[in-house]
Amino acid sequence: MAEMMKGNVAIAEAAVRAGVRFYAGYPITPSSEIMEYLAKRLPELGRQFIQSESELAAINMVMGAAACGVRALTASSGPGISLKQEGVSVLSDEELTCVVVNVVRYGNGLGTLFSSQCDYFRETRGGGNGDYRCIVLCPASVQEAVDLMRTAYELAEKYRVVTIFMTEGALGQMMEPCDLPDFIEPPKLPWGFDGKYSYKKIGIFERDSMKEAVLLNRKYETIRAEEQRWESENVEDADYVFVAYGLPGRAVKGVAREMRAQGLKVGLIRPITAWPFPVKAFAEVNPGVKGFITVEANATGQLVDDVALAVKTVFRDRYIPTHALPCVYGLPSRKFIMDGFGQVVSGARKEVY
């Protein structure tokens, strides 16, 4: 039977049931409930919880747990995730696996506490130094967040990458009914430290970086080919296609259905993976489509860049404009989406690409 749960709490319990054995983190709004819940829950099960002295310490503790081949988790928001980037870069370099939950809040620097999607660029491009990619999952409901947690670890371990679980402040704080999955007990990863020095470690000056780069590119190409995830509706005959992820994607779905009922040929693509970006979804779109419109919870429009690139990749023979509707504060309302669409159709809103 479905339980009414706050998003952050549901995410934390889903991680427990997915076999997380170690959590390290530092509190920050709007993600703190994940940490607060696990502070009690993990010790109940004989697992490890640490409130670290900083975000830097937390990600390095997670690195140690990941090196031992167990499922490890950390969560933060905004500037806290920024502080973890060096650790994410090292985890990626060592091909260690973990899940990093980012409950996104708005703003530059310390930012604000508003729910947002302003971290899209950082999470999809790799926010630290070096050449690496993280798989990025973007749930649109509490239930979907619960369902994707096990997937996050399975993908991380399949490809030996970091998975970023990119939620939003509002999703972390809202309450919805959800069904929790059964407990699983994943095996210790075979390449983890075992105290016997079974796997010889290679020093920095012994590495063949050019060979590693070729192998990494092959891995990332495989992820792009195999792991694109999305939801779409009514794109086969659409004149205009909305593209939105997370809670804005959920809001757009309802508005797009209403517009369809009014006779407007609109469709929706909702990315579930922000990386790899679901370019394949665009191949299903009406070849005569007139334009694409992103709806985003940020100030500048970030998703629009990947949409434009996907449009150029799929529709090579003609120019199709891509527009952005960035909603600075909070979630885009029905009026905001309808008014933005009207501006696009009338020509009052210029295309971004």
Image (cartoon, rainbow, N blue to C red):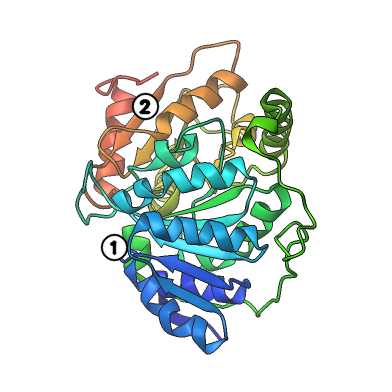
Disc 2: which residue: 323
Judge the density around disc 2: few (<14), some (14-19), many (≥20) Cα neighbours within 10 Å. Answer: many
Q: Which of marks 2 and 1 is in front?
A: 1
* Drawn side of residue 220 relative to residue 22, left or right: right
Residue 227: name its quadrant: top right
Instruction: From the top left corner, tell me how far across and down residue 323 is, in percent.
Output: 37, 27
Q: Is residue 166 above or below residue 90?
A: below
* Drawn side of residue 313 relative to residue 81, left or right: right
Residue 1 visible in the shown view: yes
Disc 1: which residue: 28
Q: Nearer the viewer, residue 307 or 12?
A: 12
- Disc nearer the start of the sequence (2/1): 1
Instruction: From the top left corner, tell me how far across and down residue 201 is, in percent.
Output: 71, 46
Q: In this view, does 278 lie above or below 333?
A: above
Disc 1 element: loop
Judge the density around disc 1: few (<14), some (14-19), many (≥20) Cα neighbours within 10 Å. Answer: some
Q: Which residue: 54% across, 18% down?
A: 312
Residue 232 visible in the shown view: no
Residue 197: name its quadrant: bottom right
The disc labelled 1 sits on which kind of residue? Ile
